[in-house]
Every structure is written in C-alpha cells, then in structure tokens.
Image: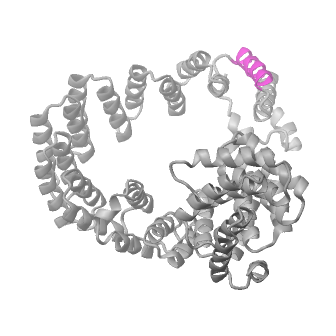
Amino acid sequence: MKKILIYSFLLFGVFLHAQEEFSNHISKKEIQFLNNYFEAEKYKVLEEYEKSLVLYEKCISIYPEESSPYNEIAKIYFYLQDWSNAEYYINEAILLDSNNKWYYYLLLDIYFVQGNLQSQVIVYTQLINLDKNQFTYYIQKLDLLRQLKQYKQAIKFTKESTKIFGKSIVLIESEIDIHLAQSNFKLAEKTAQKLVEFFPKSSSSYSALARVYLHFSEYEKAISIYKQLLFNDSDNAEALIALYQIYSNKNDLSEQQNYLAKIASNKEIDLDTKKDIFYKLLLENDFTKFTSFQMIVESALKLAPEDPLLNLILGDISTKQQSLDKAIIHYKYALNSTLVKAEYVYNKLLEIFFKQSDYASVISTASEAIEKHPFNPRLFYLKALAYINTNQHPMALETLLKGVDIVIDDPILKSEFYSLLGDVYHTLDNHLMSDESYSLSLEYNSNNTFVLNNYSYYLALREENLNLALEMARHCNALTVDQPNSSFLDTYAWVLYKLKKYKLAKDRILKALEINTNSGTLYDHYGDILYELGDVASAIIQWKRALALDINNKDLKNKIYTNE
C-alpha cells in the first residue's frame, strides 16, 4: 500500500468538504484506517486508554505494515508502566520502520526506567548506524559502557570515536572517567595531562586534571592546577568552590575565608550554591570562625538584595549579635518567598518583639502569621500572651479559646493554654471557669508548677477548698526543692496561714525571705503571720519593711496605724 500520511490529516474531522474531496482519492480501507486512528487519538487524549488500545489494534489489523499504531500503543503502555508490552510494540514499530529515530528514543526510555544498561548500549549502537555523525550517541554509549564496567570495550570505542570526530575534550574526559573508575592514577593523570597539552586554552582541560588529583587526594597538586586555572580565568566557579572546599578540609581558615569572599562576590556562581555554603556554615555555627562572614554574606546580598535565604542568614546573624532592629528588617525580606519556611521566620520575629516588649507588633505579626498558618497553635498562644501583657484580657480569652482546640498530641502545650485561660478568667473574676481551666491544665500536665502555685494561691485568697490548695502548694514546692522559688514558698506559707497553721507558715515564709529580700508581699505576709502568732511588735516591723517597698499600699498603712 502507499504510505499513509497520518499527521497530514490531524484536522481530518474539521474540514468536511476537504474530506469529501479527499475520499475520492483514497480507498475505503484507508478511510477506515484513518477513522479508527483518529478515534484512538481522541480516546487517548481523554485518557480512556482501553478504548484507544482497541482502536489502534483495529488499525493494525487493517494495515499491519503501518508502524504508527504500534508506536502509539507502545506509548500508552509506557504511560501505564507496562514495560513488557511497551517494549514489544515499539520493537514491532522499529521492524516496520527502522529509520525512525523517535522509535529508538522511546525504546531507550523503556530500558532506562528498567535500569537495563546493556540494552541501552545496543539501542545506541543502532542509532549510531542510523546517524554516524550524531556525537551525542557516542558519548551516551561510552557512559553506559563505563557504568557497565566494560572498560576495555569503552577504551576501544573511545579510540574509534576519536578517528571519526578527531581529538575532543569530551571524548578525552570520558577516557579519564574510565581510568578513574578503575582507580588507575597513572593513566588518569597521563590522559588529563594530554588534555591540557591538546587544549591549553580550555578551562575544562585544567578542571579535568584537577579532578584527577582530587579523586586521589593529591590536594597540593589539585591546588596548584586550580590556581593555574584561576590565573587563566579569575572568575572560574569550579576552581573557587573547589579551593574553598579543599581549604575547609585542611582547616586553613585564612584561605577558606579568602575563597569564601570570592565566591560571595562572584557573579558566575549561582545564588543557590552560595546559599548552600553560607547556610551550612550557619547551621554548624562555623561562621563564628570567620571575622568577616557577615561582610561576605552582605557582599552576596548586594547581587540579590531581596533574596530571602540570604536575608534569613543575616537575620539569624543579627539576632545572635543582638542587633534586633537589623534582624527584623532581614527577617521581613525573608518572608517574601516560598523558599524559606515562613513559620520559622514568624517565630523569630515574635521572639524579638517580645524581647523588645513591643506587644503591638507581636499581635499584628501573629495575626498575619495565623492567616497563613491557621493550624499553628503556638501563634495563638503568643498572640494571647501579648494581649495579656497589654491588659486586653477579653481579646486574650477569644484568642486562647480558638487556639486550644487545634492543639493535637502535645499535652504540655495544651496545659499551657489552659494555664493562661485560668489566669485570664481569674483576672475577669470568673472564678468558676478559672478553676475549671486550671484543673484541665493539671490533667494534661500534673507537674505544671505555675498552675499549681497560682491555683492554690487564688483558692487561698478566696478561702475555698484549702485542703486542695495545700496539696497543690506542697506538690509545687516538692518539684522545685532543688531550686526553691520564693513565690512558690510564699504561696505555701499563705495557704498554711489560711488554714491557721501559723508556725508552719512562718517556717515557709522565712525560707522565701532567704531567697528574696526585695518583695513587699513577702514582708507583708510575714507580718500577718507574726501578728497571728501574737508578736505584734515584730509584725509592725515587717509591715513597715513591706511599705518601704510598696509606699502607696493603703492596707499596709492601715495595719501599721491600727496596731502602733
């Protein structure tokens, strides 16, 4: 049959008039073939592959000597990862049309995904026979022979290729790779030296020789070649990076910093490579070894002033240096990218704003972060904490109630949320909800010392459930016995005072005063305890000490006035 030109009629169904005229010149058999073929194409586009395969098979039954349907079936099976059928059908297509290079390319893809190196060699040999001047085929075949460790055959093929294409940097580099794979230093060095001799003006020649020396840990020789390469090409990226890495391994800080600075200012080295180097130093805290690391990163930033990762690095450096205002500027630039983990940056900003007591910025930054990361409970917690610090307790309550429900599998954080809720409810005089929140906090973390302390103290103030208050105060101080806390001891003393256990209360308050002598509350409580023990004169002395620290306290003034 005459060759069916399928691709000439892709718009076959559109031009009806043309179809009618065309049908006068082709047979019914050919029309039947084309109709089935176009239907198969339609179903393939719709991803209805079973229907498409049936129609392509019909095409084969009509014209078994036409290669295109076999090729299309092979492509479908390739997509479906049915390698066996894909291989069978594309080989059938090749048998029918052995000059179509695209068929061989598909066969290569099939063998590639299966890791079948030997079969790929055979296909490249066929492609070379098809087009003897296609240099890429030779290089690919050489690489496969090297991977297969067929070194003698690879060397032989290199020489055959050289006869066809003449001396070539790529072919000589392939030969060097073969010698390296065999760990043959002498032949690798000799071949690389010939490469430099044949192509003395090519940077690739020197790079190849330097890589040979690196491969065999001949670092001084590698340094010499890379420096020669830089003499010829001062911006050579490979040489700068290699020398930096060599001097890093040698712990030569001076030369390492020298080449790090050159890498930073080099326009030929891509930004990602620079960032990888800088951030590795930052993560390992190695940047502290370099006196000019910050200056080096800043020089890189000049080439890309809004780069998020470089700004993140400088933000972290500025934070370590306590240059917080600079850190804020850099962190804000770092947020303008999907390449940087925004939650990390938001947390760093929030930490800084808390250090600066800039609670308005904490609230606005946390709100922005919550919009982008609505399931991060820590953001709600920090926002609520800022509201508490600005006495916006209703807003804190609303934020905490939203955040506590999204805490999953983190009992400690859950406990902290309920702890803050207890504090807020207490401030709002909702003692029922405050007690409930503190109880829930202790359910998630029974050793939460701040909850144990606050809950017991507030119960003591209200003179409610004092036995529970005593149990919590005792447990709190037992947890901190190695690092006593004056506030916790004061609470313990005050619960005992409310239980009228004045001698025990005195013992605890004195321990608190051993730790802290600058608290008016401690002296006030000590005075009250002494008063109940009948030592009014000593009580007045303690109340006066308390008043000296809290000069506007009317209750203290009244107690002193009444008892003097």
Q: Is residue 240 left or right of residue 514?
A: left
Principal secondary structure, stretch drawn in magenta: helix
| Foreground residue among 146 and 35 | 146
Q: Is residue 35 left or right of residue 543?
A: right
The location of residue 533, given as percent across then percent down, is 71, 61
The location of residue 269, given as percent across then percent down, is 37, 62
- Visible residue check, residue 87: yes
Please say whether residue 244 is one of the residues in the magenta stretch.
Answer: no
| Residue visible at 67% across and 81% down in the picture | 547
| Residue visible at 56% across and 19% down in the picture | 87
Highlighted range, magenta: 49-63
The location of residue 209, given as percent across then percent down, is 17, 47
| Foreground residue among 402 and 143 | 402
Please say whether residue 61 is one of the residues in the magenta stretch.
Answer: yes
Question: In this picture, is 245 found above or below 291?
Answer: above
The location of residue 135, given as percent across then percent down, is 34, 40
Quadrant hosting residue 531: bottom right
Quadrant hosting residue 412: top right
| Residue visible at 62% across and 49% down in the picture | 477
Quadrant hosting residue 321: bottom left
